[in-house]
Image: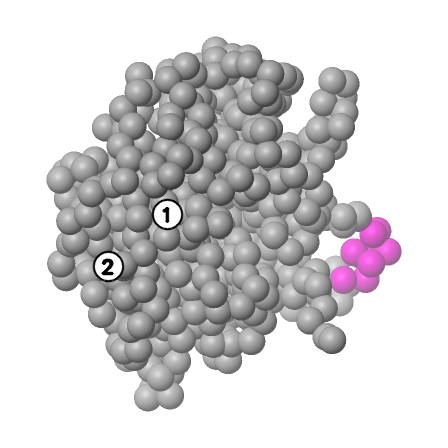
Amino acid sequence: MVRSLKNPKKAKRKNKESKKSESSSVPSAPAKVWQPGVDQLEEGEELQFDPSTYNYLRAFSIGWPCLSFDIVHDSLGLVRSEFPHTFYGVAGTQAEQASWNYLGIFKLSNISGKKRELVPVSTADNDVDMDSESSSDEDDDDEDDKSSQPVLHLHKVAHQGCVNRIRSMIQRPHICATWADTGHVQVWDISTLLNALAESVSDTTVGGNSIHRLSPIVKFGGHKDEGYAIDWSPIVPGRLVSGDCNSSIHLWEPSAETWNVDSSPFVGHAASVEDLQWSPTEADVFASCSVDGTIAIWDTRLGKSPALSVKAHNTDVNVISWNRLASCMIASGSDDGTFSIRDLRLIKGDSLVAHFEYHKQPITSIEWSPHEASTLAVASADNQLTIWDLSLEKDEEEEAEFKAKMKEQVNVAQDLPPQLLFVHQGQKDLKELHWHTQIPGMVTSTAADGFNILMPANIDTTLPSTDA
């Protein structure tokens, strides 16, 4: 169970000149593929990435580190494939002092993939910091490059305590729920701030200098401990479940302009409830995972005990994701670095479809692609974000041909799983990732040193055709 960002502080700006002098003293060597968990960096060596492998790659920050965020559904189009892109998000901070925390409601626009960019170095101040996009490369950027910089517009809303998790409602994106380390679950109406972002047309980074004071619509203190698990129903607008570290789950039902929270919790786990996911097809069914190593399936019509329970991992089950395109499939990530796929149609028998032991540190986030049923993304405490296509199988002949072709150019990594599509590194202490449901191929992740937006070039072929 790895969640908290301990003593979160903004990374110190490194001395660029000394860094350049150090790298210049290291003789150039032939490039080789870095194998995470296998290869070790020698003194003076630095990892470099190949920009051609990304359609887009950027870093940005909203101030303090964020343990959780969500992508807000917008009205700009259901499937958007042409640059430049715009996306809206909400995030919750993990500040050094409880009173310094806030919700960040932001719009990132002018996301252009015409020119592939390097990830900038993080900066040290706690204000809005899209300037890091240019400051880290300012010696090299020309005027044309500056015109392609993304633009961040940000509003902050005061939040008492660190935000353990935040989720925006699918049907009404201006409504979001937060889990605080104070033990409270709160529901917020951020419509005014989202409207202000939509109307903002400035081509420079603005906002974040002041903090708005909003009162939550609902503040529930019925949990006996803090928690991290929370999810909105994709079928019934406003229906919510929240789970805590005391193994209890509460059901929220919308009523007029508020919510009725069932004071009698769902009980069945023997330890902390780590994550919750509503079924994408059944209005009354949701799944949970726990530190007790199990995944449970609940039906709200059948009482307060799980309808089904399966031992999923040998250690804490940190996260789960229910496949919305293939609703019989559920993915889970564990504290031992493994993640698994199960077929819920076989849950009473041998439901395990796939099990991967690639990551060497706890899985902190897992999510199925909203556009390709066999694709999912995984984040781990080993500072890797990986993308997998479960439909791929090893082709010995094709692999041998590839290795022969690449032998003179690069030392090819050995024994990588054939389902592994992409490995993204560069962030420290990865916490959560999300696919953008309206921009195919876009993944956003949050870590101790800020956010990354990435669009791997090699997953284009897996996306549905947009031809008429």
Q: Label 2, on which residue?
A: 155
Question: Of 101 and 286, which appears nearest the observer?
Answer: 286
Residue 465 in the image: state x and y as whole percent: 72, 68
The residue located at (72%, 22%) in the rendering is 347
- The picture quadrant where one finds residue 163 is top left
Q: Please, what is the dominant secondary structure of the magenta stretch? A: helix
Q: Is residue 9 visible?
A: no
Asked whether residue 464 is drawn in magenta, I would say no
Label 1 residue SS: strand
Mark linked to residue 175: 1
The residue most toward the front is: 256
Asked whether residue 401 is drawn in magenta, I would say yes
**Where is 372 relative to 79, above or below?**
above
The residue most toward the bottom is: 143
Magenta segment range?
394-402
Residue 138 in the image: state x and y as whole percent: 28, 77
